[in-house]
Each structure stands twice: as C-alpha cells, then as structure tokens.
Amino acid sequence: MDNSSISAGLVTPAAARVIPFALFIAFIVLQTLAGDWMHASGLDTRWLYAARTIVVALVLFVFWSRYTEIQSFSGITSRRLLIALAAGVAVFFLWVNLDYDWATVGQARAFDPTLSDGSGLDWRFVVFRVIGLALVVPVMEELFWRSFLLRWIDRHDFLAQDPGKVSIRAILICALLFASEHNLWFAGLLAGLVYNLVYVRTGNLWLPIISHATTNAALALWIMATGNWRFW
C-alpha cells in the first residue's frame, strides 16, 4: 500500500496541511516544558530537533499526494525563480539585522551544535538542523501558512481559492500570525508579507517554498560562519 492509499480518505485537505505544522509546534512545546528536566537528567535535548525533523518529514511524505498545488511546476519561469531567490536573500538580510529589543519578544532557545569540549561542531546536529531548516521547514510551513491559512481566511473551501485573488485582509492576518510564531516578530512579519506576496503574484507554491528555503539556507550558513547560535 503506497502513501497515497494510506492518506486517501483519512484526512481532509486542511488536516493534511495542519497536522505536520501541529507536530512541529508540539515538539517546540515539549522542549519548552520538559527541556530543563531532560537536560538535568543527562539527556541532550538537541536530539529533539532531529526527532522533529524526521517525524515532520515522514508525515509530509505520507500526505504528499494530497498536496495538489505542488504537483505542478506551471508558472515557474526563469524570471519568477530569480525573484523568489532574491526575495529569500532579502528576507535573510532583514532577519539578521532586525534583532533590536523592540523587534524581539521572549527569549529564543539557542541551538548550539558545538562539541562539549569546544573543539568544533557536532556534525550530527548540524546536518539535522540544516536539513530541517532548509528543506523540511519551508515545505511544511508554506503548506500551512500560504497554501492553507492564507486562502482559508477568505474561503474555507481553500483549494478553490485562487491565490492571486486573496484579499489584503488575508495577507495581513496571515503575516501577523506568521510573525507571532517567531521570537524576532518584526522580521517574521516582513518575511510573512514577502512570502505571501511571492505566492499571490506567482500562484505556484513552489516559489514561496524556494524563497523560504533560500532564507533559511543562507541563515544556516551565516550562523555556522559567525557562531551566532541565538539565531537558531
């Protein structure tokens, strides 16, 4: 039995996009609530990120056939691809330069992949972090925020909503909620607006996924080069 048979009829189109995101958030909540206890018990909480990456990736794989909007590459032109890449790079520069106190809420848990003796990086954690950040998260989040929520705000039968015709209200609400997910809320707000606009203007979900992946990949490289783990 293939993954399309497993998922067919068992979940709604909305649930197929919400479940991976909900699992992602559940792991964050688990680390927030139990992280100190796990650390005190001698457990390395960095493995939670590896588990989160694997679990979310597996769920995306099971539901893959349900994501009809990423089965097509129509509308992806060279010009649009370059715009998506440029948008991703622009968001990266905004992200690392908008860490002012007023633009930050709460305290982010830094993901430090260095070895305990400080002699270098533990590449097991680096690999999982980069795969999660640059590959899994962009697909998972764009399916939830852009494919589902952005269109659902205007029309609960969201698959029938043309992304090019979503309202300004939907664009703003989606961006604000996207910002609430991030410690750097103002950078998150701008990122949400950029990714929303890429989807609205192109109509193909792969393009905001590419923008988001570009941002996250650039961020990962910058963090490893500079050691600014607090951005992870």
Image (cartoon, helix red, strand yellow):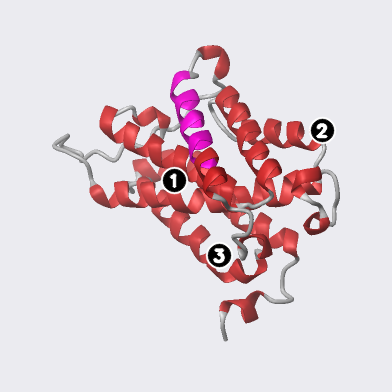
Tell me which secondary structure the magenta stretch mostly adopts: helix
- Residue 208 occupies quadrant: top right
Q: Which residue is mark 2?
A: 169
The foreground one among 20 and 146 is 146
Residue 14 vertical placement versus 24 (above, below): below
Magenta-span inclusion, residue 83: no
Q: Tell me which residue sits at (65%, 32%) in the image.
A: 193
Label 1 crowding class (10 Å Cα cut-off): few <14, some 14-19, many 20+? many
Q: Which residue is mark 3?
A: 59
The foreground one among 183 and 153 is 153
Q: Nearer the viewer, mark 3 or mark 1?
A: 1
Label 3 crowding class (10 Å Cα cut-off): few <14, some 14-19, many 20+? some
Image coordinates of residue 144 in percent, x first then y, are: 66, 50
Residue 80, labelled with which disc? none
For marks 3 and 2 on the same chain, the one whose residue lies earlier in the sequence: 3
Q: Tell me which residue sits at (56%, 32%) in the image.
A: 182
Can the viewer see residue 68 in this picture? Answer: yes
Which quadrant would the N terminus be assigned to in this image?
bottom right
Q: Are marks 2 and 1 in contact (CB under 8 Å)?
A: no
Residues under labels 3 and 2: Cα distance?
31 Å
- Residue 119 occupies quadrant: top left
Amino acid of disc 1: Leu
For marks 3 and 1 on the same chain, the one whose residue lies earlier in the sequence: 3
Q: Nearer the viewer, mark 3 or mark 2?
A: 2
- As drawn, is 163 to the left or to the right of 188? right
Q: Are marks 3 and 1 in contact (CB under 8 Å)?
A: no
The foreground one among 193 and 176 is 193
Question: Range of the magenta residues?
Answer: 84-97
In terms of secondary structure, where does tag 2 sit? helix
Image coordinates of residue 2 in percent, x first then y, are: 56, 82
In terms of secondary structure, where does tag 3 sit? helix
Residue 133, labelled with which disc? 1
